[in-house]
Structure formats: structure tokens, C-alpha cells
Image (cartoon, rainbow, N blue to C red):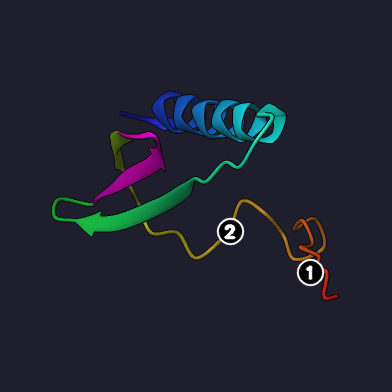
Amino acid sequence: MGNGEKESVKKELLNIFEDAFQHDGYSDFRVEIRILKRKQKEVIIHYGKQHRYVLDFLNKDNSSISPANKPKLASIDN
């Protein structure tokens, strides 16, 4: 449950996003992240069914994404 498992969950999340985006109709998915005991987090991806993962987590002061490289989210208001 190290960094490789985290990367596997990221790939699964991107695959689900791609599937939802390519769907001909309405799609809905959401992600929950819960803090567990023993320095672990549970990641639940809801998309038709629940995909559950438990990952080891070490709280680091240094973020892997610097503010300069952080992706920007845009909202569209009509």
C-alpha cells in the first residue's frame, strides 16, 4: 500500500472520468476520502458501484504539488 498503490488509484480515477466523459448520456461520479486509524485513508469512488481503497498516509508539510504547478479549476457561470 505504498506509492504504487496510490498511483494505481489515481489511474483508476482518471479511467472512470474518461468513461463518464465519453458516455452518451448523463454520468455522475464522486470521490470521498476518509481518515482512518493507523495513518491510513480510505478512498471511495462512487460510479455506479463503489470502488474502495485503503492507502497508507503520512502527513507531510511539503506538498507534492507546488502552488505554481497546481492545476487551476475553472467555473462556467451562465
Query: How busy is the neighbourhood of tag 1: few (under 14 within 10 Å), some, or many (20 plus)?
Result: few
The reply to whether the magenta stretch includes residue 72 is: no
> Which residue, as the protein is rendered here, is positioned at the far left?
37
Q: Which residues are magenta?
A: 40-50
User: Which percent across, then down, holds residue 52?
Assistant: 28, 35
In the displayed structure, would residue 60 be above or below residue 5?
below
> Which residue, as the protein is rendered here, is positioned at the far bottom?
77
Rendered image quadrant of residue 16: top right
Rendered image quadrant of residue 3: top left
The reply to whether the magenta stretch includes residue 49 is: yes
Picture residue at 69% right of the left edge, 29% below the top: 24
User: Which percent across, then down, holds residue 51?
Assistant: 33, 32
Q: Secondary structure at mark 1?
A: loop
In the displayed structure, would residue 32 be above or below residue 61?
above
Mark before the other along the chain sequence, 2 or 1: 2
Q: Amino acid at mark 1?
A: Ser
Picture residue at 40% right of the left edge, 26% below the top: 5
Picture residue at 77% right of the left edge, 56% below the top: 71
Picture residue at 28% right of the left edge, 57% below the top: 34
Tell whether 3 sits left or right of 57. Answer: right
Query: How busy is the neighbourhood of tag 2: few (under 14 within 10 Å), some, or many (20 plus)?
Result: few
Q: Amino acid at mark 2?
A: Ser
Helix, strand or loop for the magenta stretch, by majority: strand
The residue singled out by tag 2 in the image is: 63
Q: Secondary structure at mark 2?
A: loop
Tell whether 75 sits left or right of 41. Answer: right
Q: Closer to the observer: label 2 or label 1?
A: 1
User: Which percent across, then down, holds residue 65?
Assistant: 67, 54
User: What separation in Å lies between label 2 and label 1 (alpha carbons)?
Assistant: 24 Å
In the displayed structure, would residue 35 be above or below residue 54?
below
Rendered image quadrant of residue 21: top right
The residue singled out by tag 1 in the image is: 75
